[in-house]
Image: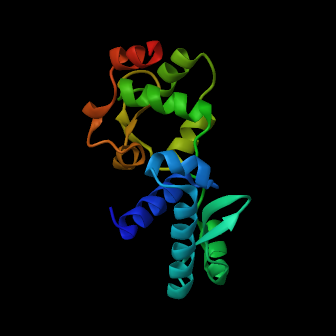
Amino acid sequence: MENKDYKSILEALLFLSGEVLTTSSIKDIVNLPEENIKNLFSELIDEYKQRNSGILIVEIAGGYQMVTNPWYAEWIKKFKTMHFSNRLSMPALETLAIIAYKQPIIRAEIEQIRGVNSDSAIRTLYEKRLIKIMGRKEGPGRPFLYGTTREFLQYFGLKDLTDLPTLKDLNREETM
């Protein structure tokens, strides 16, 4: 394998980890001595600096990490103020799982399964466009029916709802 290939591997590992990686933690993965890894990182650091890339590789805390280029801080701050967090709380995840597997479903049914009020979780999921109102259920009060959206599929990397794991799949993973 060429140095170019090893550098690409190092980039991918840094990008994936999102945190500081040490040469000792990488050496068994790439099967290279630590000194070679340090040299490759040094080359990558120089390449990113020369390009004035939006992302840099820096040596930090005894290892290496991908970081944003401070030169672009103004735009990053604007983006962060406009873009809300993609993380979901445990109640939101529970609610989303119920909706995904039981859709279309009304709020009362979700709350019966969870055993707690789900207003906040449903509101959060709706605001993040992970669920939508699919219509109204016939009956008293004509409550909203909720279902998942295309954004839900994108968020979880699913082609369609048939890609959701089955209960058997989930039980099998727990026993492993």
- Residue 99 sits in which quadrant? top left
Residue at the image position 37 percent from the left and 49 percent from the top: 154
Q: Nearer the viewer, residue 33 or 99?
A: 33
Q: Position of residue 64 (x, y in %)?
A: 62, 62
The answer to whether 22 appears left or right of 53 in the picture is right
Establish if 60 lies above or below 161: below
Query: x, y percentage for residue 138?
Result: 35, 25
User: Is residue 142 at all visible to an observer of this figure?
Assistant: no
Residue 36 in the image: state x and y as whole percent: 52, 63
| Quadrant assignment for the N terminus | bottom left
Q: Quadrant of the C terminus?
A: top left
**Residue 158 relative to residue 155: left or right:** left
Position of residue 22 relative to residue 46, above or below, is above
The residue depicted at 47 percent of the width and 19 percent of the height is 109
Where does residue 54 sit, x and y in percent of width and height? Answer: 54, 78
Q: Is residue 119 left or right of residue 60?
A: left
Query: Of residues 133 and 150, which is closer to you in this image?
Result: 150
The residue positioned 50% from the left and 27% from the top of the image is 107
**Rendered residue at 57%/73% (across/down):** 42
Instruction: Answer above or below: position of 138 versus 146.
Output: above
Q: Is residue 106 visible?
A: yes
